[in-house]
Image (cartoon, rainbow, N blue to C red):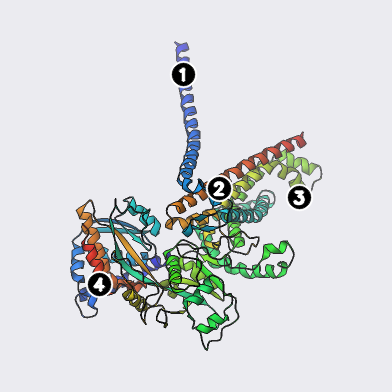
Amino acid sequence: MTQSRTLTQKDRGRINDRAFWLLCVTAGVAVLGILAAILVSTIQQSWPALSNAGANGFFTSTGWDPNVGKYGILAFMFGTVVVSLIAVLFAVPVSIGIALFLTELAHRRVKAVVVTLIDLLASVPSVVFGLWGLYVFSSWTKPLYEWLHDTLGGIPVIGALFGSVTGLNFMTAGLILAVMIIPIITSITREVFDTVPAADKQAAWALGATKWEMIRGAVLPHSFGGIVGAVMLGLGRAMGETVAVALVIGAAIQVTPNLFAPGYTIPAAIVNLFGESSGEFTAALIGMGVVLFVLTIAINLLAQVVVRRAEIRMKGAVA
Amino acid sequence: MNRNVLSRRGVAGIALAAAAAIALAGCGTDTPSNTPTSGAASGLATLSGEIKASGASFPSAFYQEVIAEAKTLAPNLKITYNSVGSGTGKKEFASGLNDFAGTDSLVKDTEVDKTKLPFFYIPTVAAPITVSYNLKGVDKLQLSADTIAKIFQRDIKTWNDPAIAADNPGVTLPATAITVAHRSDASGTTSNFTKYLVAASPAWKLGSGDTVPWPADTIGGPQNTGVATAIKQTDGTIGYVDLSDAKSSGLAFAAIKNKNGKYVLPSLEGTTAALAGAEVKEDLTYNPLNAAGDASYPIAAPTFILVKQKYDDPAKAKLVKEFIKYLLTDGSALAKEVDFAPLPDSLKAKALAQLDKIS
């Protein structure tokens, strides 16, 4: 009797276990399934453009004129990369600074206020950033750009980055994106810094480390993987950002070192041009979407490799 | 355009009152085109049902105005117009997702299969496209088509260029650098502006279309308001903006030399004059760009509604017919308030006749 009862309980437990397992597997597979479905249908719809990619120079040409059937997306890829890099370059030091301030330096009350403010920044819709960039920020930054152009523009090689100034450009778009991804990177790095074992920190103190030495020796190495992850998440957001960039990028199809020149990004082009496109033009725009998709996946994989290598190296050092 | 729609809500009350007054005046002597209207209005009032439409964003401000007005006359009639862009509107029309589509561009065979889905073009309104500029010390500017072409393809880079001076005798032009602003989104406004340059200037080399390969040292702004903002922000900037946005942004605009050699400022009257001078084709498509006539303003954007020649549901056919009839007749009184030029009487009569063929 007792024997059989415990058996039924065990059985029930096993059934519950299996159900839970099934649920989790379904959810996991669904994610992969959705990704695959997106990839398949976008490739299918962009096939008219992708199938003669070689002949048309889809990936290698900057010639873009839908009226005569020229679809070279190199300038769009270039713009996407440049704008995202500017965003990450400005956002990462600021975000890490904020996160360190919050975890290591700030008073508890100050911390609560700042965290709320940053979370608020994360919840501002991107179109608001875009409009602010277009109407306010671009007028503020123009004199600064002109000053940079006047002072740095003459230097050989580096001077090419600071060419003649137009109101809407790579730099403005990149800076707007930086503001948008700061909350994401900050909140993740802050969480990561919080997980640094107190023992590590105290060990650093005990050895007579200053605050900075403690951060450099105990906090940063322990958090490296998490920081890279946060940066990649921010980079992904920056690369895919659509409306805000479309409003401030200036829509010029060109590959130029000049950061103060107008450019174009893949998401901005899709949102600007899709409504009035048809036929092969539509296919080319969807093809751009596929390229962006692949680019994002590639960057994520790269990030994983970087994190794994760093962790191996660090563990070696610890041991 | 978006701002138009928003601000429209504010003025809707006033507009409704004004339009109602005009409707009550009925067959008054104010305009000859009001004559057939009272019939259309009463036809609308008894209708009930739903019309779904989508398409061009350019005439959207006007259509929304008419829809709001129609709603007060026929409370049981539910009409929606989504301004999703001409291209998307046509796609939705081809796959039967809307009852009619608004479009600024003509339909290509690849977009809608005429043999499977026969349709009519119904012209509705037109609007002038201004060449707006921001140049300190110059409040009056005249431009010929060749000069505009050279400015927008960057052959001319400073304001005191001899070509601009030749168009403006007696005006002192500064040596300011020219910045060119254009639309960053694919747009019927770009299409019509560039088509005008193709028609009027042999110097123009960039072709025409919803987007054209602009030189890299020009800047693109989103929508009409984006271009207007770019113009306002920098001294020496020139761009093309539709009249209602140019006015609401307080921009200065140039008088354009028309086919008859006269410099004409953009206005609704000048646009209607251009429409009257344009040659109308069998299917009621027409091209008002670079039209003849002393008073014609040469850069105007026409817009059309696509309707099916035969609707599966006769009740739907009647709804669509009555609503568009209303839009062309009573509704045209609202057009001027939102800076659209109504059709001249001859073209309006043709459009109404076309509408009657729907079954």
Indicate the position of residue A78 as horizontal and vertical percent values: 60, 54
Relative vertical location of residue B35 with respect to residue A271 in this rendering, above or below: below
The residue shown at (28%, 69%) is: B331
Location of mark 3 (residue): A212
Relative vertical location of residue B91 with respect to residue A162 in this rendering, above or below: above
User: Tag 4's secondary structure?
Assistant: helix
- In-image side of B160 versus B53 (left or right): right
Q: In this rendering, which labeled residue sits more in front, label 2 or label 3? A: 2
Q: Are marks 3 and 1 in contact (CB under 8 Å)?
A: no
- In-image side of A309 versus A129 (left or right): right
Q: Which of B320 and B155 lies nearest the eye of the viewer?
A: B155
The residue shown at (45%, 46%) is: A45
Which quadrant of the figure contains the N terminus of chain B? bottom left
Q: In this rendering, which labeled residue sits more in front, label 4 or label 1? A: 4
Does the rendering let one see residue B74?
A: no
What is the crowding at mark 4: few (fewer than 14 residues within 10 Å), some, or many (at least 20)? some
Q: In this rendering, which labeled residue sits more in front, label 1 or label 2? A: 2
Q: Label 2 is found on which chain of the structure?
A: A
* Quarter of the figure with residue B70: bottom left
User: Tag 3's secondary structure?
Assistant: helix
Q: Which three-letter amino acid code belongs to the residue tagged 2?
A: Gly
Indicate the position of residue A289 as horizontal and vertical percent values: 51, 49
**Real-space Cα distance between discs 3 and 1?**
57 Å
Relative vertical location of residue B92 with respect to residue A197 in this rendering, above or below: below
Location of mark 2 (residue): A54
* Quarter of the figure with residue A178: bottom right
